[in-house]
Amino acid sequence: MQGEADVRPDDERPLSGLAFAVAGAGRVGASLARWAVAGGARLARVAVHRRRDRAEELVGDCAGAGNGAEIVPFDALASGDLDLLLVAVADPALDAVAGRLAERPQAAVVLHTAGARGASALAPVAANGSAAGTLHPLKAFPHVLADPAEARGVTFAVDGDEAACRLAERLARTWGGVPQRVPEAQRDLYHLAATLAAGGVVTMLTAAERVAGTAGLDPHVLGGYLELARGAVAGAGEALADQGSFASAITGPAARGDGDTVMRQLAALEAVSPALADLAAGVARQALAAIATAGRASDSHRQLLARLEARERASAGRPG
Ligand SMILES: NC(=O)c1ccc[n+]([C@@H]2O[C@H](COP(=O)([O-])OP(=O)(O)OC[C@H]3O[C@@H](n4cnc5c(N)ncnc54)[C@H](OP(=O)(O)O)[C@@H]3O)[C@@H](O)[C@H]2O)c1
């Protein structure tokens, strides 16, 4: 039943008629629930673990659109009368939560949001007749992202029973996202690649920060490195659009095959931080590998690779 306050036409409410519950009103659960409600779905129930305030905020924000949602403890959550149960709990809790949810009837479709796990994490609820699947937003949620526009262009990794995949794909498309089937067997490496693309990029910035620190540079230079990184990521986006790969956007002396500069800089860093020098050498090797895979390796790239391999052999022999 729709609320009186919600008078938008049906074409602005593509999820109209969908009733759902959310288990876990954290950053992801509270964001996706808001996006679903913005699409016309009805939030019926929110299960809380410890932070009732988060659930109250979510229910308060969704009120006025026919969403007088009930807040219940996890061990009382039943959603057998609903179309969807969205499970967005901390990864270490997922297996135990799935077992506890299976003690009561659950929704026709149950989706979890963990990137590294397949639909089998929900096996206990699937055994009770729910279609189980995943809806993993390939996006960082540093906090609740209330605006559904945040979903535009985001890839959502979908997996599981067919009915679950279909609903997950419908949600992703409604939000302007891009559903992508990622089967269970690929999940570990899918998630590792995501970690490299997000936390890995930021970790490289922290490495740049440490190298700049060892050189005694003014900390204001960090803003310059951030701007440089923004430009590099923008270039990677253009390379992907043009050539279907990031590789041609790699810049720097290794990408140019300038072996003398690479080896001189590594020696300078090695003198102050052998660990950072090993990291930088590994990054240079990865750049060369990507260039070779793209079929663009020249003699100077190959010579640099040989020098890096020789350095690695020498490093392996140095005292730890
Ligand atoms: N954050 C991201 O960038 C991101 C991106 C994509 C996918 N994900 C995935 O989305 C899921 C949720 O992540 P999140 O970032 O939203 O985490 P979060 O903000 O820390 O929220 C975690 C939720 O899990 C609940 N919870 C924790 N332990 C529990 C337990 N033992 N039993 C029941 N509920 C429990 C918490 O309840 P209380 O608050 O009451 O303790 C909270 O509602 C995870 O699978 C994560 O991998 C996260």
Image: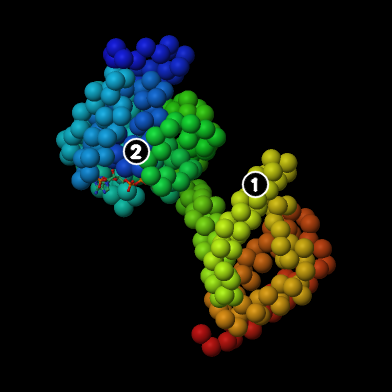
Q: Which mark is residue 234?
A: 1
Q: Which mark is residue 86?
A: none
> Do callouts 2 and 1 mark residues in contact (Cβ within 8 Å)?
no
Under circle 1, the secondary element is: helix
Q: Is residue 319 visible?
A: yes
Q: Earlier in the sequence, mark 2 or mark 1?
A: 2
Which image quadrant is residue 283 in? bottom right
Query: Ligand 1 near label 2 (Cβ, under 8 Å)?
Result: yes
Kind of residue at badge 1 = Ala
Pick out the residue farthest to the bottom. Answer: 319
Which image quadrant is residue 135 in? top left
Q: Is residue 301 left or right of residue 51?
A: right
Q: How many marks?
A: 2
Q: What x and y, as percent, mark residue 13?
A: 42, 17
Pick out the residue farthest to the right. Answer: 299
Q: What x and y, as percent, mark residue 120?
A: 37, 43
Query: Which residue is found at the position 73% from the left and 66% from the top?
Result: 253
Q: Is residue 306 visible?
A: no
Q: Is residue 256 above or below residue 25?
A: below
Under circle 2, the secondary element is: helix
Viewer-nearest residue: 208 or 215: 215
Q: Circle 1: is it few (<14), some (14-19), or many (20+) Cα within 10 Å?
A: few
Q: Is residue 225 left or right of residue 139?
A: right
Residue, disc 2: 29
Query: Which residue is found at the position 37% from the left and 12% from the top?
Result: 7
Which image quadrant is residue 29 in? top left
In this figure, which colouring scheme has been used for the structure? rainbow
> How far is disc 2 from disc 1 in space, using C-alphas?
30 Å
Q: Is residue 317 above or below residue 28?
A: below
Q: What x and y, as percent, mark residue 172?
A: 47, 30
Kind of residue at badge 2 = Gly
